[in-house]
Amino acid sequence: MTDRSNFFDTKIEFLKGVGPKRAEIINKELNIFTYGDLIQNYPFRHEDRSTFQRVADLNENMAAAQLKGRIRSVNIVGEGPKKRCAVEFTDGTAICEFVFFNGAEWYAKSLREGGEYIVYGKPQPFGGKFSFNHPDVETLTPENAEGGYWQPVYNLTEKLRKRFIDSRFLGKAMRTVLEQAYPHFRETLPAELTQKYRLLSKADAMWHIHLPESEASLHQAKRRLKFEELFYNQLRLLKNKLIHKTEYPGQVFSKLDLVRTFYKPENLPFDLTNAQKRVIGEIYDDLKGGKQMNRLLQGDVGSGKTIVAFIAMLMAIDGGAQTCLMAPTEILADQHYRGLKPFADALGVTITVLTGSTSKKARKTLFPALADGSTQIVVGTHALLEDNVQFKNLGLCIIDEQHRFGVAQRAKMWNKNTIFHPHILVMTATPIPRTLAMTLYGDLDLSIIDELPAGRKPIKTVHRYDKNRLAVFGFMDEEIKKGRQIYMVYPLIEESEKVDMKNLVDGYESISRAFPQHHVSILHGRMLGYEKDDEMQRFVRGETQIMVATTVIEVGVNVPNASVMVIESAERFGLSQLHQLRGRVGRGAEQSYCILMSKYELSKDTRLRLDTMVRTNNGFEIADVDLQLRGPGDLAGTQQSGIADLVIADLAKDGAILKVARTEAEAILEEDFELALPKNAPIRSHVDSLRKEETNWSRIS
Ligand code: ADP
Ligand code: MG
């Protein structure tokens, strides 16, 4: 063990070919200090230098080509910014040309007419020949004459390049260090797994991730390292989850009297879907199980998560505890409160609401009622997190639309009951892809509502250009005449808030002018709480037919009679946001529509976003496209941990590996939670070294 850590801790200045001067620059520019650092600095791509192409066979579809031949002539041509070094080159099959704009003089001096070279670059047809712009040129030597290798390409800086520390240099250094390192690598995966999935050994994978011999060997190296990374990621999450389960007892809520009463047809306005019933069963199993619940409830927009949440609350209340429901906006909190109050009243359950706009006076009675247990349900915003919100016995905390809250908030609610931590149910507004859920919420149990209530007509979505506005207005008019209501949403993003605000107000005015016979509401984030509330209520009561709004209506607002959603400048919204907005309609029995308005010129990604919206209503499918487009980091938000630790695995692409890694981690923990079995020794020692690394880091940062 000691000789291993010694080896990987060796300073790179001791590496042959590096030395103290270069080491210093590499330290500074790449943050690489030791052999270990160097080896873990993976290349971001490779150049295929395995074979040579013939000049006569070049074609414009080649991403790159490697040539071996002789320089016929070297000339400086052109003036000013067009001044360049033009080189004629042949391998005997045909002639091609290289041009160098930057450092033209230097190239003209260094490249020899008649000299033999190996050249790598992208061929482009130009004037009947193929031309290479700034190709990579090296002198032909016995070492490179046969090709047969893949050149790793590393991240570099200008400073490094100036000192000739480039990918070729690092590739050579890597070969030197890996030759020495090879016997020092310790296998981190048990033989059972490497055999079952035919994974390369750790040492071979580290070799081939830098210096593969072929596309296939690179692929195998990546597969092995991705598996390892995801396996340890999942192992940690699952271990936390199990520790939670064994260490934290939960209050036992097994009585179902209230649920049974609520379930009677006179109270429950509809039949639950099978998916809702199944999820309620999963929650009930947790609540009566004696362990503290940590569960994520995923379900598409409109799948009916609220009623599931309410039934879970009834279970806790029946067990003598209090519950809270935390929503990300005031509008949503108010709406949840209004929606649930009649149900609660009918059952004799006490319910209240707490948001930023709750008055001091109201708080004076509200806080004591929570503290003495006389209020059983509190619905609210993050105002619930405040320290003066104290419960007599908080038994269940439900967090709606989690992606707006951080993990820290979850922990805060968790500590509102220190005798028995409350059961926690997190609900997401928009589905997130399974792979992302597994890493972001891998320590939570997962419930999915994968079915919409019966009788919902799929929302019809169309994409229209701004120039078709009149036709869209005509359509809106017809729908209003049928008694429907309409949302019109404008983008509002912080950077251009002023412009957006103006667009919103202009939009409001032009809508009011276009529909003089109808009433129009306006809703945006700058309005005061009670103003928003008034406008929302006017719309809910049907006094206004059109609601012009920003994305404040994005989450959760529920007005079943609103059946048309027009989204202005749809190109400026993200995919999940569009889906979320669309989810505001399609809640009643009528056919609903979503109209995406955009300008005519659209980027490829934007077009894909809008086309996806038109093609499908399925939130999980949309989430997958979103993941492909935006990448996991963006989707998850910056403050989310867990994703940042992934160096080589890509959640957008490696879902299949992730699934297997999780299953295996689960099986291993189930059989050997302490990782004490001899066959799991590699895991145990790797976990220990990861932990050591982590504590070192936390001491630094
Ligand atoms: P979300 O999952 O987006 O939070 P909600 O809980 O707001 O969805 O439910 C959307 C709408 O569907 C609400 O009007 C709700 O009353 C209704 N709903 C929920 N479950 C059912 C069901 N099983 N049958 C019919 N309507 C339902
Ligand atoms: Mg909801």
Image (cartoon, rainbow, N blue to C red):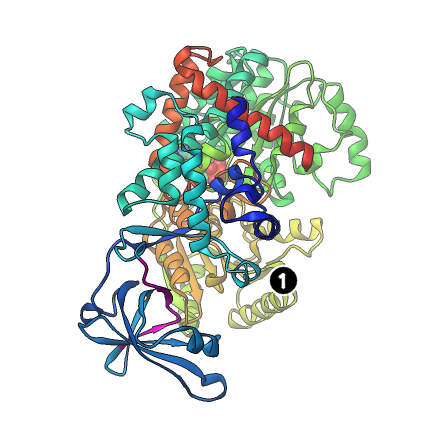
Identify the residue shown where x is 71% and y is 52%: 528
Ligand 1 visible in quadrant: top left
Front residue of 20 and 65:
20
**Which region is colored magenta?**
130-141
Identify the residue shown where x is 41% and y is 20%: 666
Check residue 446 for magenta coloring.
Answer: no
Tell me: 528 left or right of 404: right
Judged from this view, the residue extending furthest toward the bottom is 79
Total labels drawn: 1
Dominant SS of magenta comes to: strand
Which percent across, then down, holds residue 145? Answer: 28, 58
Taking the image as drawn, is residue 74 in sight? yes
Taking the image as drawn, is residue 541 in sight? no
Classify mark 1: helix, strand or loop.
helix
Which percent across, then down, holds residue 430? Answer: 47, 42
Tell me: 66 left or right of 548: left
User: How busy is the neighbourhood of tag 1: few (under 14 within 10 Å), some, or many (20 plus)?
Assistant: few
Front residue of 50 and 462:
50
Which percent across, then down, holds residue 334? Answer: 63, 40
Identify the residue shown where x is 65% and y is 22%: 376
Disc 1 Cβ-to-ligand 2 distance below 8 Å: no
Q: Quadrant of the C terminus?
A: top right
Residue receiving disc 1:
495
Q: Quadrant of residue 621?
A: top left
Identify the residue shown where x is 69% and y is 55%: 527
Q: What amino acid is found at the position of numbered circle 1 in the picture?
A: Glu
Q: In this view, does 121 lie above or below 346?
A: below
Q: Is residue 204 above or below residue 267?
A: below
Q: Quadrant of residue 361?
A: top right
Front residue of 120 and 462:
120
Check residue 136 for magenta coloring.
Answer: yes
Which percent across, then down, holds residue 473? Answer: 44, 68
